Amino acid sequence: QYSFGKILGVRWTIQRGRHSGQIEKIFPGVKSHMSHFIFNCSGESSLSLSELSEELETLYASNGKTYTVESDAPPRKGVEIPESELSVGPIISTYMTSENIDDFFSMTEFSNVYNNWIVHKLLSLKEDFGASETQTIEITRIWSNKMLQGSRGLIHEHSSGYPYSCNCIFYVTVPENSASYVLHDNQGNITESISVKTGDLIIHDSELKHSITEHNSAEPRRAIIMDYRYV
């Protein structure tokens, strides 16, 4: 079964052009993949991902916890596997609920990246997720993952129960031989594997199943993940 947002995603593709490649010509910097969208901030000179990476390292040092297959993972509704098996291998994660999102927005460069780039991309897609009458974004959860060599993420989703709910992932640092972001259908079959790069922002419906392949680089990969809804 397709969620309402995914149905709109298909309709939007038909309205804009038969092939998703045509959408890039209309909206440079965005690629439509039916139920998900990808932007990249490489052309935004006012954003400093190196500074953001340093801010995240400070956050990891103060609030980070290392998750493995033997330890408890952050609680996420809708996950079909034991929470303890969500992340396999070493992964340092800071996990924030809506009550302490301020820990992220206290970071100067994160606030710059979010307020001057990310939120505008999220709002630009509200019609595609059936939320044309909404006015703004509410972040319901936010966290950052630092993937170390050998770590991966098993198939899961971020279903929240809120209307107009979506998930986005912003890639702050992606070294060579990093993991891919894999999309699945409702039966768990792989539909697409995305080779992400530094500066990518992936946005999709919160019910879209996904996983992460093994991170094979000795250099860590840093990403910020947000569950949000249009309100």
Image (tube, rainbow, N blue to C red):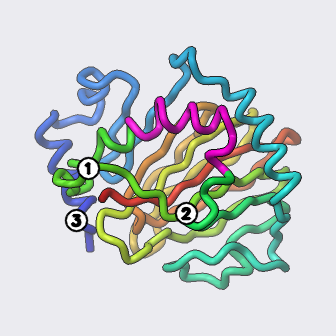
Q: Where is mark 1, residue-wise? A: 135
Taking 39 as reference, is 23 left or right?
A: left
User: Which contiguous range is marked in magenta?
Assistant: 104-120
Q: Residues within 10 Å of mark 2 (few under 14, many from 20)?
A: some
Q: Is residue 114 magenta?
A: yes
Distance CA(mark 1)–CA(mark 3): 19 Å
Label located before the other in sequence (1 or 2):
1
* Residue situated in front as seen by the camera: 120 or 7: 120
Q: Is residue 11 above or below residue 197?
A: below
Q: Is residue 216 magenta?
A: no
Distance CA(mark 2)–CA(mark 3): 22 Å
Q: Amino acid at mark 3?
A: Phe
Callout 1: SS: loop
Q: Amino acid at mark 2?
A: Arg
In the picture, the disc for residue 60 is none
Question: Could you say where residue 153 lies in the image, as x and y percent from the top left?
Answer: 67, 63
Question: Could you say where residue 81 lies in the image, as x and y percent from the top left?
Answer: 61, 82
Q: Which residue lies at the image location 23% right of the left edge and 35% below the top edge?
A: 19
Q: Amino acid at mark 1?
A: Gln
Question: Could you say where residue 29 lies in the image, as x and y percent from the top left?
Answer: 40, 25
In the picture, the disc for residue 4 is 3
Principal secondary structure, stretch drawn in magenta = helix
Q: Where is mark 2, residue-wise? A: 141
Q: Is residue 91 above or below residue 31?
A: below
Q: Which residue lies at the image location 14% right of the left edge and 43% below the top edge?
A: 14
Label located before the other in sequence (2 or 3):
3
Mark 1 and mark 2 in contact? Answer it, CB < 8 Å. no
Give the number of the mark in front: 1 or 2. 1
